[in-house]
Image (cartoon, grey):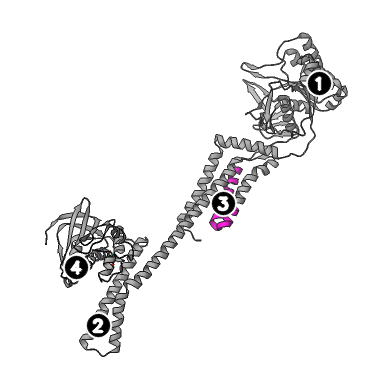
Amino acid sequence: MRRSRRQIVEYVGLLAGSLVVALVASWTALGDQIDKDAYDVIFRMYRPPDWEAQSILLAIDEESYRVTDGKLRVAVAEGLERIAPFAPKAVAIDVILADRLDERDNERLAAAMRKTPNVVLVTPLLAKGWEDPLPIFRAAAAGVGHPYAEPDPVSREVLLEKIWGRDRRWALALETYRLSVSKPVIETETEVQVGDVVTPSRVLRIRYRPPDRPVPKVTLAELRGDPKLAQRFAGKTVFIGVTAQSAYDRVQTPYSPVPMPGVEIHANIFETIANRLFLVTAPMLATVAFCLALVAMAGVAFAFRSGRQSYLISAVVVMIALAAPYVAFARGTVLSFTAPVFSAWFSVAAAAAYHYFVVRKRMLTAEGDKSRYQQAMHFVTHEMRTPLTAIQGSSELMGRYALTEEKRKQMAQLINSESKRLGKMIEIFLSVERLSAGQLELKKEQFSGMDLMSGCVERVRPLAERKQIQIRIDGGPDAALLGDRELMEYAFYNLLTNAVKYSPSSTDVTVFTVRDGERIRIAVKDQGIGMDQKEVRKIFQKFYRTKKAEESGEAGTGIGLSIVEQIVTQHGGSIEVTSSPGQGSCFTLVLPTQKVNSMVESK
Ligand code: ADP
């Protein structure tokens, strides 16, 4: 398949456009929502390699509440008292301890905290700032952290730091991790480093443990029932919090629409950090480059392959786009879902549509070429037969018989004039065909309409005289026409010969012009056989002749008027016919003019 430069530019432009549209669409709110949903689906589809949990939950569930008379601080104190002897690495308490409440309970809890290593307390951010735990608790704890994961409503990320005024708090899980490894937090502009763990950014995607292998959990009630369970806390980082169904502190995770207690989310954040299970966002440039590659593949599929193959390749392109986010996720990179998928779909659709229309256009052109060829053949067989027969006959006679000098001259003249006629016919036919195929520019010469008319009338006169038909030029304004004089002559001459051919003898043919605004109307009116409205509609078709015309005995092929129409339309004009059977016809050329001159007198 060969393509023009313009087509290539168009095609590449179209593909580039579909890439831009795809990228913009993926950045809209809808694209963002689809990306999030796709992220959750991939999250559920992908099974991370198992890892041993470094944290454990000490859960205060309904039963634990019941056994501690609904006193949360007592429950936490008892939990600490039971696990402290087994030396957990650090203990995060996800319970707000800012209110006074019962002094004795507070004393007991603070005492338990002092016996526990690396206690971290939670500090909520209120309108007036951080709400710190009571001093008695703060003094007994090693650190504080904020409790906020980002729910939207699905909790996928956590802000590692949160700032109020100049007072910044790390996320509870990060603070707990820092204390559990007893390393300081080192910050760079984008990263946060604790020991040899370097987070990729300050907004961290939470890598939840799969639902069938959650962070281990022991409830206080269970611990009470079986104190030996406290061994499970040895060397682990503990997250103490409320898991009772009635607690408001629950958020959705990508794994399930069933909300997860906040304390478990903190433990999952901790697991993400402690095990360096970071999910990094694919760089923008890489995403765009990947989309560009998909678009290029779709473009190439349709440019160099045909039919089935291009659709097969497109299917592969779409599959790659669909699979890429999963494959990237499995390698710890979060790739936009919509950007590649939209890019693949849009570019395939655009390339397929373009391909379809271009191929269709080519097919139509090929069909046009074929029908033009057929017409040419018809033309040759119909119209050229007469002069050819005359030439053949005359030349044969000349060769075969000894003719008088005069006869020979006559025949030579006939051959000459008929072959000239043939030449002219071919020329006109070819130019009209090339004009309508757009392969030829119309000549632009200026000539007088009146000259054209009278020239043609003079040429037709001998033919008319044989039938005693009078041709009259009835006057009207002259006009300067612009175009190909020879073609226009052919058109007008055709109307005149038709008028003479299809009129009985001793009738009149009248030629006149009428001004029509910026246009001029050149009319040929006869008193001939005429035709009905149905026939009028058909006479411009190639090879159509009316029944009456056939019966008239006048030679004809039915192609003349179709050529006339083409010539006139190429000149920006039109042709009108009024006719009635037995009464006569009037053929009018309506042509644009350069300028209209004064009236010409009647002849
Ligand atoms: P041809 O004259 O070779 O048949 P044309 O294309 O010039 O072909 O005309 C097509 C047909 O239109 C004619 O055969 C005839 O039936 C009809 N026609 C054209 N001009 C006239 C006219 N002046 N009066 C009656 N019929 C006409």
Q: CA distance from mark 4 to mark 3?
A: 69 Å
At label 1, the amino acid type is Leu
- According to the picture, the residue beneath numbered tag 2 turns out to be 411
Q: Nearer the viewer, residue 165 or 397?
A: 397
Mark 2 or mark 3, whichever is nearer to me: 2
Is mark 2 in CB contact (under 8 Å) with mark 4?
Answer: no
CA gap between label 2 and label 3 equals 70 Å
Residue hosting label 4: 504
Q: Three-letter amino acid code at disc 3?
A: Ala
Question: Mark 4 and mark 1: span between their CA atoms?
Answer: 122 Å
Question: Which of disc 3 and disc 4 is earlier in sequence?
Answer: 3
Asked whether the beta carbons under mark 4 and mark 3 sit within 8 Å of each other, the answer is: no
Q: Splitting the image into 4 quarters, where does residue 280 fall?
A: top right
**Which quarter of the figure is the C terminus placed in?**
bottom left
Query: What secondary structure prevails in the magenta region?
Result: helix
Q: Is residue 293 left or right of residue 17?
A: right
Q: Which residue is mark 3?
A: 298
**Residue 220 marker:** 1
* Helix, strand or loop under label 1: helix
Residue at x-position 60% and y-position 48%: 318
Looking at the image, tell me whether mark 2 or mark 3 is earlier in sequence order: 3
Q: Callout 4 environment at 10 Å: few (<14), some (14 to 19), or many (20+)?
A: some
